[in-house]
Every structure is written in structure tokens, then in C-alpha cells.
Image (cartoon, coloured by chain):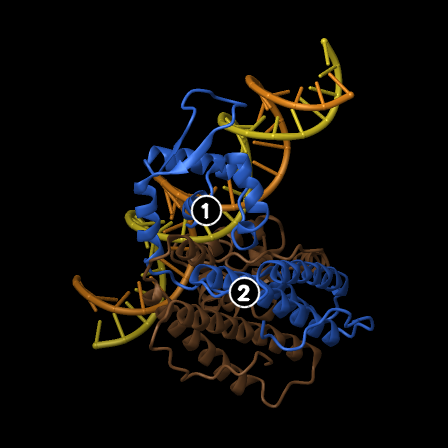
Chain colours: A blue, B brown, C orange, D yellow
Amino acid sequence: MSLPHALLTALIERPGSGLELAGRFDRSIGYFWQASHQQIYRELARLEAAGWVRSMEPDSGRGRRRDYRVLPAGRAELKRWVEDRSAPKPLRDELMVRLRAAAVLGDTALPDDLRQRLASHREMLANYLAIEARDFTPAPASRERRLRHLVLKTGIRHERSWIDVCTEALEILGDPAVDASTERPSTGS
Amino acid sequence: MSLPHALLTALIERPGSGLELAGRFDRSIGYFWQASHQQIYRELARLEAAGWVRSMEPDSGRGRRRDYRVLPAGRAELKRWVEDRSAPKPLRDELMVRLRAAAVLGDTALPDDLRQRLASHREMLANYLAIEARDFTPAPASRERRLRHLVLKTGIRHERSWIDVCTEALEILGDPAVDASTERPSTGS
DNA sequence: AGAAACATGTAATAGGTTACATGATTTC
DNA sequence: GAAATCATGTAACCTATTACATGTTTCT
């Protein structure tokens, strides 16, 4: 369960309110850990109850903005958690189930779905590559920026993998229109 | 939500009982969609209630083996579902949160975790490669077997990606003992 | 008869998703 | 003052996980 620690990380990077965090989760952090604003509000309340964060403006209920910052205990908890072990999460993707079902059914038409997925993976890849060009050229030297670059490159690698898979699936299913308009040479980032 | 359709697929491949399906989910299917026996029993009951599968031995409660087979309505439902659209599931991995937290904390020791993950990804890769060598050499020609091979190759690609990520993370965090005993040339399968 | 393995289930809890509700601030 | 937007929440539901409970068959 990583959401509380993702929130601690985000709040150390910069304090903020629930909705603002939800916005950040739609951008940078959300590229590898998604959360809705409902989850974020619930979790922020828990973090505050645990004494890991504190909100200014302790009064005020609904509708009033509450900014949170991380307390020393929260920073300590984050450090403890980072050094924990984590079992690698196995691959779990609906498309794999679909492909296997298509294999056993023998006569399906899922290329529509595949074309759509291909398009959205290409879009996401272009998005990541733009961020990389903007924020990480030339290649960063500091440890912190190298780590952040690595996280982004993981996203890039991920999209390239799925582009390859969709493309090959379309070939197998005999689709004519597999245009190679977007790059995908090997997988090195 | 793919579990019911994963079960239908598995039962079309071969009818069986709940525990036997749980065993198969620990092997082939579970490589890309995991499920516990508790989930499987609950879902089989739902599939039967929906009229998609039927169990022989309609009597018998606890402790008695119940074998399920797929009814025509279940096959139709599976086909309908396969041809549905599915939004690509974004990357979601705890390690990414950890790396970003390490970046912001600045002084953590997570190489232990990374080494362990590296080992288990290498183990899984070896496992997949063995299956590929056994079941898919020479490269299959039929549509069905090519699809099943593609699913396996996706697993292989997935493990190779994580091996690369862990290795680079260890380099950044200044770990001395990154042995390259397991192959990882590029990523083409 | 006892133990081990096989087999099916229940209960409690937590996390995530969707839909909805409500208050505050800004803009016209 | 009405509408739009910002902001914080509640409720219902579903899936997944964990721990536990119970019955059946097989083997010795």
C-alpha cells in the first residue's frame, strides 16, 4: 500500500492542499501511481491522525482550503518505508487475458481495441519523450535528478513495450493497417 | 474486471474444479492474472448463477469436488467481452514510488531491496525462458499458438525491463556488486 | 483410527471507483 | 445575485487479501 507514502513524498517535494495534490497525481506522480481526490482526502486525514502531517488552518470544514506539510515523524516513517522490502508486483493486464481468450475462441475481432490501445500508448510515449527532452537534456548528474530521470525512463520503456506487443498482436491477427509512424527501434531509452 | 473472463477462458481450454483452477492460476494464467482460491470459488458461483457455466454433481456442498464446464451462453459472453474496448492500464508500481521517495529523502539505503528484486526478476525470467524453450521452439505457426507465445514473450519483456531498471537504480545509488550474470542484451524477444 | 492431502467455503478488512453532496470564492 | 470554479467531503459498492472454518478422500 503506497498511497500514504506517495503523498508524503509529494508533500516533502512541496506542501499543498488536497485538490492541488490531486492535480499533481494527474501529472507527474500519477504516471506511476494514480489516486482520485476522494482517496487523497481520506488518506490525508489518516496521515494527520497518525501525526505524520499537519494542516495549517486547523479550523474550517468544507470548502475551505487546507494546506498540509510533513512533520518530522512523517519524514521518519517515509524513510523507514523506503528501506522496507517490496515483493515485485507480477504483471497483471487485461489485454493478456483478452489475447489468451482470443486464442481459445479462434475467431474474434479485437483489432479495433488493439488499434485504439496502440494509439494511446503512442500518445503517452510522445508525452513522456517531450518531458524528457524538456527536463532531462542534457542528462542530469545529481543523484536526485538521475533517479527522477530513471522513473521517467521506466515509463518510456513501459509504453514502448506495449507498442511492440500491440503491433505484434495485430500482425498475428492479420491486420493490414499497422503503420509504423511512431518510432520504436529497440528499447534502450 | 477480468477474473470471470479469465476463468471462462481457462474452463474452455479445459473443464475443471475450483482448486484445480487455482492451481492453473498459480502457473500459466497466473503469470499475467493472479487469483486466490477464495476469489475463484466466489466467481465460479457467480458464473453459474449467470448461466455461463454449469457444474456436474449439482448436489454436494463442502468438501465434494465440483467440476465446471462452460455453457454456450458463457462462450458468447466471452466473445462479447473480448471485442470490447479496454483502456490501457497505466503503470503502477511501488518501486517507482520508492525511488522517487529516495530521490527526495536524499540519504536512504534501499539497495538491499533492489538486489532482492533483481534476483527475483532474474529467476522469473529464467522460468519464462525455460517455458519458451520447451513449448515454443521452433516458433509456432498457428494463430492460436502464436498468440500464446506472444503472451509469454510479453512476460519475458516485462522481466527484462525490470532487470534493467533495478540495475540502473543500483548504479545510481552507488552499489558495488551489480553482477551481470544473467543476460540482458536489448529487449527483443 | 489417525494423519495428510484434497476440496470448498465464510468472515473481516482494506483499497479503489463511482456517484453524489455541500460549502467557499471569484467573476460577470 | 447568479454562475462558474475551487475545494472538501460522504456513501455505496466492488475487488482483493488474509485468516479462519469445515467437510471428504486416501493412505498407512
- The image quadrant that residue B147 belongs to is bottom right
Residue A154 is marked as: 2
Task: Give the residue type that dot 2 points to.
Answer: Thr
Subunit that carries the residue with mark 1:
A
Quadrant where the C terminus of chain B is found in the figure: bottom right
Of all residues shown, which one is farthest toward the bottom?
Answer: B138
Of callouts 2 and 1, which one flags the residue occurring earlier in the amino acid sequence?
A: 1
What residue would you read off at disc 1?
Answer: A13
Q: Is residue B7 left or right of residue A83?
A: right
Residue B144 location, x and y as percent? 67, 76
Q: Is residue C26 left or right of residue B162?
A: right
- The image quadrant that residue A174 belongs to is bottom right
Residue B135 in view (yes/no): yes
**Pointer 1 local density, CA inside 10 Å: few below 14, some 14–19, many at least 20:** some
Residue A158 location, x and y as percent? 58, 65
Q: CA distance from mark 2 to mark 1?
A: 21 Å
Between B67 and A182, the one nearer to me in the picture:
A182
Residue A100 in view (yes/no): no
